[in-house]
Amino acid sequence: MEIIDANTTFGPSPRITADISIDRLLAAVKRHGVTKSLTLSTVGIFHSHNDGNADTIAQCQGKPELLPVATIDPRGYFGGLKQTSNLISQGFKMFRFFPGEQGWPLDHNVLEDILEEMEDNSVPVMINAGRTGDASALGRIIGGKEHPLILEGVVFETLAEAVSVMKKHSNIYVETHSLLVPGGLRFLVDQVGADRIIFGSDCPRSSLGGALRYIKDSGISDEDMSKVLGGNIKRLLGG
């Protein structure tokens, strides 16, 4: 069963003293048989998205198991620069946004500008949606757009909200690393189908082995598990 981890990072963090270096990420990927990991430098989250994107591309070079992910902080982004197209041309496979960690609201108008700018391509977008109301806000923002949007950080308390939004918008998906409640994954499969669920671990900030065990012990069918662990994100990436 191919495993593609859609949620990994590497680099310095102001909140974590543990080793979250790229070497630790690569070791975990190899140890757990992960084929590909979508990843980005934390410099892009906590310092500068331009510096972070440059670090991501540099660190992923020569490492076929790593797929570079770009990030943009709306607080420092000015429209009309076609930055998203430039990033895609550099080889970035996905975009991620971190409203909670950077302290901006989901109804930030620049975020909407960026999403509109990306409408001409199909590169998936992942946004943290861990707070009550986040998924609903993103559902309103995404409107009738067809761009694939992955909700990251959904927990038990926000699961019902995420399901409601997903039922209204077929282009919205959910990532798994925060779904630690027993039966949560099976519930999601029953409600929205296995095709809408993306495996992520938040490694090395969180345990890759634990994230995999949650999927493998969930009781879903092998066919559904194959979709969750790799098939769905591979399809969104055009693979």
Image: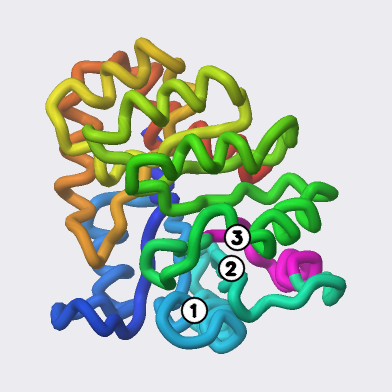
Disc 1 to disc 2: CB gap under 8 Å: yes
Asked if the magenta segment contains residue 224, the reply would be: no
**Tag 2 or tag 3, which sits nearer the N-term?**
2
Q: How many marks?
A: 3
Q: Quadrant of the C terminus?
A: top right
Tell me the residue that label 1 is attached to: 44
At horizontal 29% and vertical 78% (from top left) the residue drawn is 23
**Residue 35: x percent and y percent?**
41, 51
Secondary structure at numbered mark 3: loop
**Tag 2 or tag 1, which sits nearer the N-term?**
1
Badge 3 amino acid: His
Mark 1 → mark 2, Cα distance in angstroms: 8 Å
Can you tell which of label 3 and label 1 is closer to the viewer? 3
**Residue 70: x percent and y percent?**
58, 68
Q: Is residue 215 above or below residue 32?
A: above
Tell me the residue that label 3 is attached to: 108
Tell whether 213 sits left or right of 148: left
Q: Residue furthest top?
A: 190
At horizontal 41% and vertical 47% (from top left) the residue drawn is 129
Foreground of the two, 79 or 68: 79
The part of the chain drawn in magenta is 84-96
Asked if the magenta segment contains residue 92, the reply would be: yes
Tell me the residue that label 2 is attached to: 70
Badge 2 amino acid: Ala
Q: Is residue 221 above or below residue 54?
A: above
